[in-house]
Amino acid sequence: MSAKIRLYVEHPLGAGQSVPLDRDQAHYLFGVMRLSVGAYVALFNGQDGEWLAEVAEAGKRGGTLVCLEQTKPLQLPPDLWLMFAPIKKARTDFIVEKAAEMGAARILPVQTEFTNSERIRQDRLQAHAVEAAEQCGGTYVPEVADLQKLPRLLDLWPAERQLMFCDEAEVGNALQLAAETQKVAPWAILIGPEGGFSEAERKRLHALPQSHVVSLGPRILRADTAAVAAMTLWQQALGDW
Amino acid sequence: MSAKIRLYVEHPLGAGQSVPLDRDQAHYLFGVMRLSVGAYVALFNGQDGEWLAEVAEAGKRGGTLVCLEQTKPLQLPPDLWLMFAPIKKARTDFIVEKAAEMGAARILPVQTEFTNSERIRQDRLQAHAVEAAEQCGGTYVPEVADLQKLPRLLDLWPAERQLMFCDEAEVGNALQLAAETQKVAPWAILIGPEGGFSEAERKRLHALPQSHVVSLGPRILRADTAAVAAMTLWQQALGDW
């Protein structure tokens, strides 16, 4: 018994639990993927781990799945926030997808001085995070926050949260991160906009006692590349890799 | 004097050197970017570093730039090949772009047992590598090879080239890579297809004396994410970061 399709649902999961499907989910499972009664689906809700479920009712506008057994416990990612300045639509979608795959706990789009976008579609980005979790075998979906201004976020910065800050203008050493003693602290990674940080922002970030400057090599990386590279360094040094 | 636009040209560069533009380049510089005579452009050709050049003639079907001074020496990336199994068009384009940004010296699309694509558009992928080099400030453009079958590539594998092989089925330790003594050797990274490697391929890869298995964490990464993550680990441990 195993399921090829993984589906995120907003419903409690447990042995014998019935899970109702909405119209979109029914369309996907029965219309697109052609499942019928008796087929298996893997379900997760971000809280109860992954469950093998069986299709009990299949209709055009809905249906019901019944949970059979737990196939994975809940695996929470490390307490890592990924903060980034939204860029062109496709690349913003990619950053959210990558953050979910790489194991960020929370995704925060931030508006910097050189950020072009003044708004994001939070619901669309959240849907990308869900899809990435479905694909990557995760049992957790990071929350995508609404767009916030960077200065406001820094005003309210939590005292214990360390900040890995990738500054193109800086020749730091990525390895130094591993030597830090902040293994148990919560962390955040901040990826700047394509135009870089402003001088005022750079000053403010460097002044923050929790900030750790990290270099991502001698070439200029696009923001989506930088996001994956920075998360790789962090996961390897301080995370769950 | 500085240039906002970087352009790759297939022409020698040097002090006072005239560089003729083809129709596409002239359209881009004068039609799209609206440059006129006297404007500055940064040129590189993968061999002579980066040169500041001035527009001497601007026409609809061509034009001429004249090199003024060298602004960067040639910076060759480490001798790292990125090998990957082509996937959907957009993600294949991304892998090539990311490989060029991250500093791969050569990009080799490989056909594995579970690779869907049986052909690639080598010219289109090469154009993506050029564009990425233009964007990332590099002075080198990695060559994109034609699609090759993995077994054939392994049959002819160069004795001195080490192979970092990312196997989802393996719980290796990424850190071990740093402890290897292969700092001076040429390397290659192999990213498997979305469906993973076949049992036969996995056996063959593990048997290769040059191969080093590396884990990319507990979540399943898409091939484009895995490519960036693997190159990050390599660059940090053995490359030019």
Image (spheres, coloured by chain):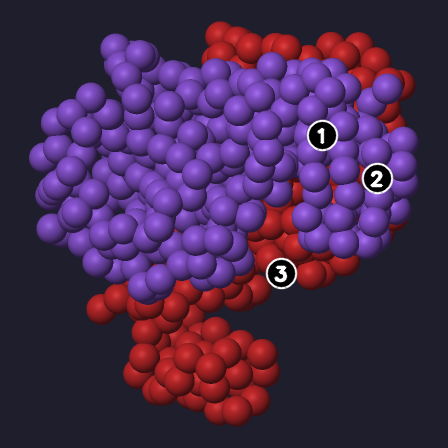
Chain colours: A red, B purple
Q: Where residue B107 sits: x, y (%)? A: 40, 40
* Residue annotated with mark 1: B18
On the picture, is A34 further left or further right than A188?
left
Q: Quadrant of the N terminus of chain B?
A: top right
Q: Where residue B202 sits: x, y (%)? A: 16, 45
Answer few, some or many: residues within 10 Å of disc 3's Cα (few below 14, many 20 plus, some between 14 and 19): some
Which residue is rendered at x = 37% and y = 23% of the image?
B79
Q: Earlier in the sequence, mark 2 or mark 1?
A: 1
Q: Amino acid at mark 1?
A: Ser
Q: Nearer the viewer, mark 3 or mark 2?
A: 2
Q: Where residue A125 sits: x, y (%)? A: 67, 55
Label 2: chain letter: B
In terms of depth relative to the viewer, which is nearer, B63 or B132?
B63
Q: Amino acid at mark 3?
A: Ala
Q: Where residue B203 sits: x, y (%)? A: 11, 43
Q: CA distance from mark 2 to mark 1?
A: 10 Å
* Residue annotated with mark 2: B57
Answer few, some or many: residues within 10 Å of disc 1's Cα (few below 14, many 20 plus, some between 14 and 19): some
Q: Is residue B90 visible?
A: yes
Which residue is rendered at x = 61% and y = 10% of the image?
A172
Label 1: chain letter: B
Q: Amino acid at mark 2?
A: Glu
In terms of depth relative to the viewer, which is nearer, A170 or B63?
B63
In the image, which disc is placed on residue A127? 3
Which residue is rendered at x = 27% and y = 35% of the image?
B165
Q: Nearer the viewer, mark 3 or mark 1?
A: 1
